[in-house]
Amino acid sequence: MVVTLDADECIGCGVCSQICPDVFELNEDAGKARVIRPEGAECATEAVDSCPVGCIHIEQK
């Protein structure tokens, strides 16, 4: 699994980092989330489903 996030679409709500802090963090300076562990974790799927703008993507290897 490879987790990516489209920063142009991200609104910085922080839901992903709350649900899956091992994979995402909120960059407060930029006001957007970012992926800190692209290899993902189980919680990344829940973060994808919870993102209000659909900017998180998971590709299976």
Image (tube, helix red, strand yellow):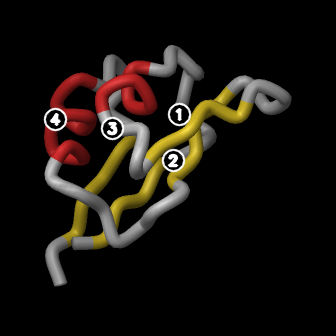
Q: Amino acid at mark 4?
A: Glu
Mark closer to the observer (3, 1):
3
Tell me the kind of residue under disc 2: Asp
**Residue topped by disc 2:** 6
Quickly name the residue at label 1: 9
- Does 27 sit left or right of 1 as displayed? right
- Total labels drawn: 4
Judging by the rendered image, the residue that carries numbered circle 3 is: 20
- Local SS, label 4: helix
Q: Alpha-carbon neighbours of circle 4 within 10 Å: few (<14), some, or many (≥20)? A: few
> In terms of secondary structure, where does tag 1 sit?
loop
Q: Which residue is at a point 16% across and 35% down the rendered structure image? A: 46
Q: Mark 2 to mark 3: distance in Å?
A: 17 Å
What's the amino acid at mark 3? Cys
Dot 3: what SS? Answer: loop
Asked if labels 3 and 4 touch by Cβ distance under 8 angstroms, the answer is: yes
